[in-house]
Image: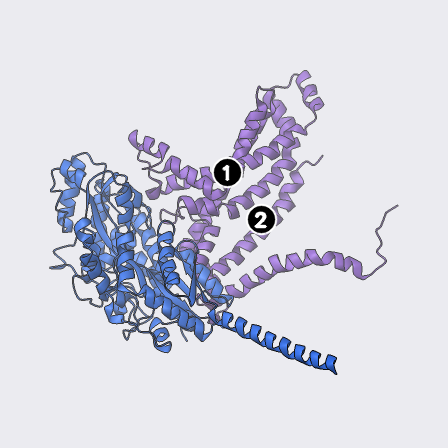
Chain colours: A blue, B purple
């Protein structure tokens, strides 16, 4: 009897202990963080800076742990995310470059639009707080934010003040128009500069941005915002004349085509070329490497085509939320919290001042002004000024074209043939339009229904 | 009398075969089947929608004048790389095989480039030939020769051919050297005593006796030029200027990975598969007959 009682008591005790420990571990479980996978495409040093921002979020609260991982450059990150989605294993958040926007939008159920994420999880989100040129690029046709803009850039002119001085040009005034630019490169050449001018991202600077600041369409259907049936318009006389000018200047040795994408970037900080049109993100590298006085200025324009230039369009990347069959509501909530942190003006301003990307929120821009950043770094506000100088039109909202990376390559290829004298400017752009439209039609067919 | 291996257990031979068959199925047959499936479908990048389009992808690829240009460039590229790397390796092997001081050091140095990844090799070439930062590129421009492979088809093709061949010389060199050392000294000595000159000895004795090695290397080099030069081209020219250095395999990558056009990319893979099967069949049927196996 006694033994049995003892047994009963000890059993009860054991049960209680078990229940207690279960309760404790349950509490521990509730405190375990929701883990968010975040894939990005920024190499060092920018990748490390981005991971610092993410760490700032992880340290700011104890519910969510965001794990950033570098997946190669932008196209490689895009490829990795698509492959992961196909395998049912997509990351929660992926950083996607701006030209992948149309592909992501066409992905339909693979992507959860940011406006939907924020409203579903009841998270406050101020879409109006973004710079219009930024918001427009990542908004749907009816103006809803589809992705979270983060690192945006635009293209501007950087020029070597020492070389300007040597050539008898005013080092404090960069040429504002193309005719002035041509005059300047002639003087630079005469003064013995081997490479007066070059341009990075040939398609982005010489066609996409050129079209935007002159309010000329790159493609029909409001540059693709109106629908998948857009067609390229870059064989318009305006673009043909511009390419012809570039070809003539190249022949005279006044400008130099120095390769695709950002391959020409090093030529400016190395002092090789006196003027470069490049991403505003090049600034950090110039600050670090250039051993000469330099300045930043807006892109030049053609005064015979436009009285005053419009806003330029953005580049860079944004954060997209990807879906997966295994995703829980708690995970989406965690992503929303992460996004709310990344959208804070102070986070935006710090990122802008640390890296050379433009501020994406109006308040972030203000915060950087108030911090006295532009007094200490003259010219650092040129990109943001250029992005915000006018209200956006349908030609300056950005491009929404399927497979834009392929179209960019096609235009680069045709330019290369033209610069070698294998074809005229008209032939080059006719051919680019024809090939580009084939790409657009294939995209339209593959993404219909 | 013939010796035969007899298994008592009927299942055992099949069991022993299974790993090999499984590897073949999973890593060769399955992807090939997928490529064929994708080549007759039109898909979006995320694989959410796919429609059967018969042979439209093949039609689009084969009627694309750019694809035919790429095919032609590939032929030139493969022929040039194979000839150059085989020729250079044979010359070096013959020289290294002779009685010279420090032959070991020469041999080691010649084998070195093989240890480099193609992309690393290409970056080294870029540091030599880039018009602005390359040592030789700068020198050429300073001497008044307009060297800029970014805007000159011929220069670009020449450079990728040189880079791709250089990478393969080491491999060929090892095989040629081994082949040369396997040639019986007595035969060569007999020829020398009979008064045959060095070049006569080479063409009548060494070259025919090397032919199995040469044949083997020919196959390996063509396959190399076709499939493994991707890294070199990607790092040096990205297929440009225009499409001047775009080979078939580079275009498969470009269309599939960069442009997300899986249908076109798969159709090209299938075409490539047919070309390679054909090439291999021709080589073994016709070229091998003339090869002298001892």
Q: Split into 4 quadrants, where in the image is the C terminus of chain A?
A: bottom left
Query: Does the image show residue A317?
Result: yes
Host chain of mark 1: B
SS state under label 2: helix
Write down the residue under mark 1.
Answer: B167
- Judged left or right of residue B200, residue A269 is left
Q: Using the image, determine if residue B76 lies above or below residue A408.
A: above
The answer to whether residue A326 of the structure is visible from this angle is no
- Percent position (x, y) of residue B16? 75, 56
Q: Are marks 2 and 1 in contact (CB under 8 Å)?
A: no
Chain identifier of the residue bearing label 2 in the image: B
The CA span between labels 2 and 1 is 23 Å
Q: Residues within 10 Å of mark 2 (few under 14, many from 20)?
A: some
Marks 2 and 1, the one that precedes in the sequence: 1
Between B283 and A324, the one nearer to me in the picture? A324
On the same chain, marks 2 and 1? The answer is yes
Q: Is residue A358 above or below residue B162?
A: below
Q: Quadrant of the N terminus of chain A?
A: bottom right
Q: Nearer the viewer, residue B217 or B194?
A: B217
- Categorize mark 1 by other alpha carbons within 10 Å: few (<14), some (14-19), many (20+): many
| Of the pair B141 and A349, the residue shown nearer to us | A349
Location of residue A364 by image quarter = bottom left
Residues B86 and A265: in front is A265
Residue A237 location (% of width, % of height): 20, 58
The residue pinned by badge 2 equals B279
Picture quarter containing residue A404? bottom left
Percent coordinates x, y for residue B7 in the rendering: 84, 56
**Which residue does the image show at 38% across and 51% down from the upper left?**
A43
Residue at the extreme bottom: A1
Query: At numbered mark 1, what does the secondary structure look like: helix, strand or loop?
Result: helix
């Amino acid at each position: 009897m006694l033994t049995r009682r003892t047994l009963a008591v000890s059993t009860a005790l054991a049960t209680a202990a078990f229940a207690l420990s279960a309760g404790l571990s349950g509490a521990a479980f509730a405190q375990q963080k929701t883990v968010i996978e975040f894939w990005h495409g920024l190499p060092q040093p920018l990748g490390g800076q981005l991971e610092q921002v993410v760490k700032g979020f992880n340290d700011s609260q104890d519910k969510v742990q965001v794990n950033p991982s570098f997946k190669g450059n932008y196209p490689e990150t895009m490829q990795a995310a698509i492959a992961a989605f196909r395998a049912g294993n997509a990351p929660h958040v992926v950083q996607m470059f701006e030209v992948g926007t149309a592909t992501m939008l066409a992905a339909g159920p693979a992507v959860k639009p940011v406006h939907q994420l924020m409203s579903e999880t009841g998270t406050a989100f101020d879409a109006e707080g973004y710079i219009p040129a930024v918001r427009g690029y990542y908004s749907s046709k009816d103006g809803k934010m589809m992705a979270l803009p983060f690192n945006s850039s635009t293209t501007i002119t950087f020029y070597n003040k020492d070389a300007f001085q040597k050539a008898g040009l005013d080092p404090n005034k960069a040429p504002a128009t193309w005719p002035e630019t041509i005059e300047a490169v002639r003087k630079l050449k005469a003064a013995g500069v081997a490479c007066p001018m070059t341009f990075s991202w040939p398609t982005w600077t010489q066609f996409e941005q050129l079209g935007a600041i002159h309010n000329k369409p790159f493609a029909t259907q409001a540059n693709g915002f109106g629908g998948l049936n857009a067609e390229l318009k870059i064989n318009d006389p305006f673009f043909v004349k511009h390419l012809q000018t570039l070809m003539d200047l190249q022949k005279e040795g006044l400008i130099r085509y120095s390769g695709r994408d950002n391959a020409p970037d090093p030529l400016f900080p190395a002092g090789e070329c006196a003027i470069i049109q490049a991403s505003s993100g090049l600034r950090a590298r110039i600050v670090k490497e250039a051993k000469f006085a330099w300045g930043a200025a807006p892109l030049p324009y053609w005064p015979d085509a436009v009285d005053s230039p419009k806003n330029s369009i953005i580049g860079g990347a944004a954060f997209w939320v990807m879906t997966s069959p295994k995703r829980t509501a708690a995970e989406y909530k965690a992503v929303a919290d992460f996004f709310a942190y990344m959208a804070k003006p102070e986070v935006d301003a710090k990122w802008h001042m640390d890296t050379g990307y433009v501020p994406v929120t109006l308040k972030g821009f203000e915060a950087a002004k108030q911090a006295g950043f532009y007094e200490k770094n003259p010219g650092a506000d040129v990109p943001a000024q250029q992005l915000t100088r006018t209200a956006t039109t349908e030609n300056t909202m950005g491009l929404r074209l399927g497979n834009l990376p392929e179209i960019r390559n096609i235009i680069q290829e045709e330019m290369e043939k033209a610069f070698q004298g294998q074809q005229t400017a008209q032939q080059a752009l006719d051919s680019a339009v024809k090939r580009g439209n084939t790409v657009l039609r294939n995209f339209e067919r593959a993404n219909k229904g | 009398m013939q010796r035969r291996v007899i298994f008592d257990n009927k299942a055992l031979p099949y069991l022993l075969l299974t790993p090999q068959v499984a590897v073949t199925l999973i890593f060769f047959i399955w992807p090939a089947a997928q490529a064929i499936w994708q080549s007759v479908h039109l898909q979006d990048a995320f694989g959410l929608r796919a429609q059967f389009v018969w042979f439209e992808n093949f039609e689009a690829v084969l009627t694309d004048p750019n694809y035919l240009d790429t095919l032609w460039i590939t032929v030139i590229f493969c022929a040039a790389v194979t000839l150059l790397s085989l020729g250079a390796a044979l010359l070096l092997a013959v020289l290294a095989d002779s009685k010279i001081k420090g032959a070991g050091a020469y041999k080691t140095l010649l084998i070195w480039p093989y240890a480099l990844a193609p992309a690393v090799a290409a970056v080294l070439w870029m540091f030599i030939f880039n018009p602005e930062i390359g040592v030789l590129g700068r020198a050429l421009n300073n001497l008044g020769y307009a060297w800029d492979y970014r805007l000159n088809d011929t220069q670009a093709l020449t450079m990728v051919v040189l880079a791709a061949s250089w990478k393969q010389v080491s491999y060929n060199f090892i095989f040629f050297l081994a082949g040369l050392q396997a040639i019986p000294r007595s035969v060569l000595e007999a020829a020398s005593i009979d008064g045959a000159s060095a070049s006569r000895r080479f063409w009548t004795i060494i070259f025919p006796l090397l032919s199995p090695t040469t044949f083997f290397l020919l196959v390996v080099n063509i396959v190399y030029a076709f499939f493994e030069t991707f890294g070199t081209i990607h790092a040096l020219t990205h297929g440009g200027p225009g499409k001047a250095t775009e080979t078939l395999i580079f275009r498969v990558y470009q269309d599939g990975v960069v442009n997300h056009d899986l249908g076109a990319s798969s159709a090209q893979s299938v075409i490539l598969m047919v070309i390679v099967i054909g090439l291999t069949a021709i080589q073994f049927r016709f070229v091998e007959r003339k090869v002298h196996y001892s």
